[in-house]
Each structure stands twice: as structure tokens, then as C-alpha cells.
Amino acid sequence: MALTKADLAQRAAENCRFMKVEAAEIVEKILDMIKSLLTVGEDVMIPGFGKWSVRLKRARRGRNPQIGHSIVLDARRVITWHYSPVLKEAVNKSWSRS
């Protein structure tokens, strides 16, 4: 099951005693900030969780699998995410207990 923005807002409302509408607005604003920073090429790091970075991929040769012809894939920017060692340890601890 995937966690949605509505689920995040609901949990924030319950845990922080916000109204659900306020929590939804806060979640939306945080995600908008992350998106706007990544759009201009800034890294976003949340200690204990992870880091999002924008990387430039150069143009490269590829192949159309349907007809087998070579094509040139344009240069583009991609978003990468690296988890924090703290998050990795927490996930592995909880998994090993199960």
C-alpha cells in the first residue's frame, strides 16, 4: 500500500493535533518547496531521511526496441535520491524483527 498526500495529512493532523485541512496545506506546501528547489537544481537534504539531487545526463545513443534502429537520446536532468544511513539502519532493524 502506498502512502498518499492525504494519508500524510491525516497522520500529521492526528499526531500534531492540527485540523485536517491545515495539515493538508502544510504537506502540500512542503512538497511544493521541495519541487521548486529541485526545479532550479538545488539539492534537498532531510537529515536522518535522505537527499534528493538533480543530475545532468548527457546525450547518448540508444536503440528503439520495436524496430532495432539506433537513436540519440537527448541530454536531460534526472532526480536521484539517496537514503540516509540512519534510515537504512531503521528499516533493516524493523525488517529483521519481523
Image (cartoon, rainbow, N blue to C red):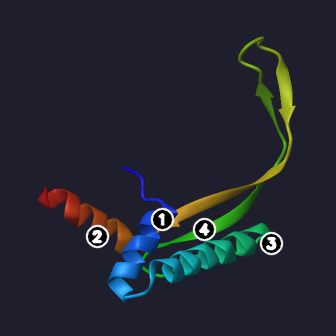
Q: Answer with the quarter of the image where residue 93 lies.
A: bottom left
- State the residue at coordinates (77%, 67%): 39
Residue 28 at what x, y percent from top left?
A: 60, 73
Q: Is residue 33 left or right of residue 64?
A: left
Residue 41 position, x and y percent, is 77, 70
- Callout in the foreground (4, 1): 1
In the image shown, does 88 or 7 lie closer to the viewer?
7
Residue topped by disc 4: 52
Q: Label 2: which residue? A: 90
Say what amino acid the circle numbered 3 marks: Val
Where on the picture, by quarter, is residue 14? bottom left
The secondary structure type at the circle numbered 3 is loop
What is the x, y in percent for residue 52?
Answer: 60, 68
Task: Tell me residue 79's x, y (percent).
Answer: 67, 59
- Which badge, 4 or 2, comes first in the chain's sequence? 4
Residue highlighted by disc 3:
40
Residue located beneath label 1 in the image: 6
Q: Secondary structure at mark 2?
A: helix
